[in-house]
Structures are given as C-alpha cells and as structure tokens.
Amino acid sequence: MDDNTNIRAVRPDEVAAYIDPLADVLIDCVEGGASVSFMLAISRETAVQFWADVARSVMRDERTVLVAEDAKGRVLGTVQLIIAQPENQPHRADVAKMLVRRDARRRGIAARLMQAVDESARSAGKSVLVLDTVTGGDAERLYHRAGWERVGSVPNYALMPDGTSCGTTFFHKQLR
C-alpha cells in the first residue's frame, strides 16, 4: 500500500489540465500490453484526443475521472465512472479504463481506485456497476478481491495491442 498516493476525482474545471498526464498513463499501459481499446503503436495524438473527448464528457457531467497522484502530483493511475446511462437505467454506471502506470503497480493503487469508484458511484446515486476486462489478466483478481461478481466471458471479444485475439470477462457489483 502506498500511503503517499492521493486518490481523488478530477473536477470539471480542471480536467483539461489532466489531458497530457492521463495520455502518458494510457500510452504506458498500452505499450505494456493492456487491452484498453487501443492498438500499438499508439500515437500521442490518439491518446490526447481520447482524453480530450473524456474531458468534454466530464464537463457535461456524464462521467467522473478519478486519479491517483503521488506526493509531487504525478498521475500514477486512473479509472472512470460513466454515470450517463439510458433513461431506464438511472441506477447503473459503467467502470472504464482502469489504468495504473507500470512503474506504480503492486502498491495497492488499483485497489484504492476501485474503492474510490465505489464511493463516487454511491454519491452519484448508482447501485449497480458493470465493467469488462481481459480474460485471465491480473485485473480479474483485482475485481474479485474488490467484491465484484463474474458474469461470464466472451472468447475472441477484442484484440490485444499487438493484434492477437483475447477474451473478455464481464463483472458486476451491487452497491448496498
């Protein structure tokens, strides 16, 4: 556990300043093999555009971006809570893009981000959370330890950054 890491939601009025550091985290994770919607070689332009789109979504109050920062303010990780859902699912949110820099892993940061996303969801009035992850990856253990329930897997659902096929496992969590 890294007690010097601060986990917090990025405010809409400051989210634009986080685009570049979040792009750094995304690039690091994709280059490390994370299947998070992007392929190698991910360009800086692609990563910045993704986070610029996310920033606009934050400003529209459609999602929350949580960050883990070290004592110097360096972004070590992030996760998103997508709160804008269809009219018949006002109680649900999606958890997306759980990313921790490779040099910051195995310090409890992802677990703390998952705790913070639960708190953020409760604050937003959400009681059902869903997410998906690469089948057989380290994240499956993280989500299980954080109280998530496995729904099932779909073989060949996505591609790894190098183009190889991978399955995707779906999880849900009922907040009480």
Image: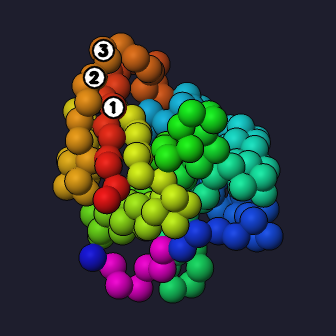
Q: Secondary structure at mark 1?
A: strand
The residue where tag 1 is placed is 170
The structure residue drawn at horizontal position 48% and vertical position 80%, both measured from the top left corner, is 6
Q: Residues within 10 Å of mark 1 (few under 14, many from 20)?
A: some
Element at badge 3?
strand
Number of disc labels: 3
- Rendering coords of residue 37 (x, y %): 54, 31
Amino acid at circle 1: Phe
Question: Which residue is found at the position 70% from the left and 42% from the top?
Answer: 50
Q: Is residue 38 above or below residue 126?
A: above
Instruction: Tell me, yes or no, if residue 109 can be seen here.
Output: no
C-alpha span from label 2 to label 3: 6 Å
State yes or no: discs 1 and 2 in contact (Cβ < 8 Å): yes
Tell me: residue 86, above or below residue 53.
Answer: above
* Pointer 1 with pointer 3, Cβ within 8 A: no
Query: Disc 1 and disc 3: Cα gap in Å?
Result: 11 Å
Please name whichever residue, 136 or 58, is drawn nearer the observer in this view of the structure.
58
Q: Is residue 82 above or below residue 35?
A: below
Q: Are marks 2 and 3 in contact (CB under 8 Å)?
A: yes
Q: From the viewer's side, name the closer residue of 31 and 52.
A: 52
Q: Which residue is mark 3?
A: 155
Disc 2 marks which amino acid? Ser
Colour scheme of the picture: rainbow
Which mark, residue 153? 2
Nearest the eye: 43 or 134: 134
Residue 75 included in the magenta stretch of the image: no
The part of the chain drawn in magenta is: 2-7
Among the two numbered marks 1 and 2 on one chain, the one whose residue lies closer to the N terminus: 2
Residue at the image point whose x is 63% and y is 35% from the top:
87
Task: Give the CA distance from mark 1 to mark 2.
Answer: 6 Å
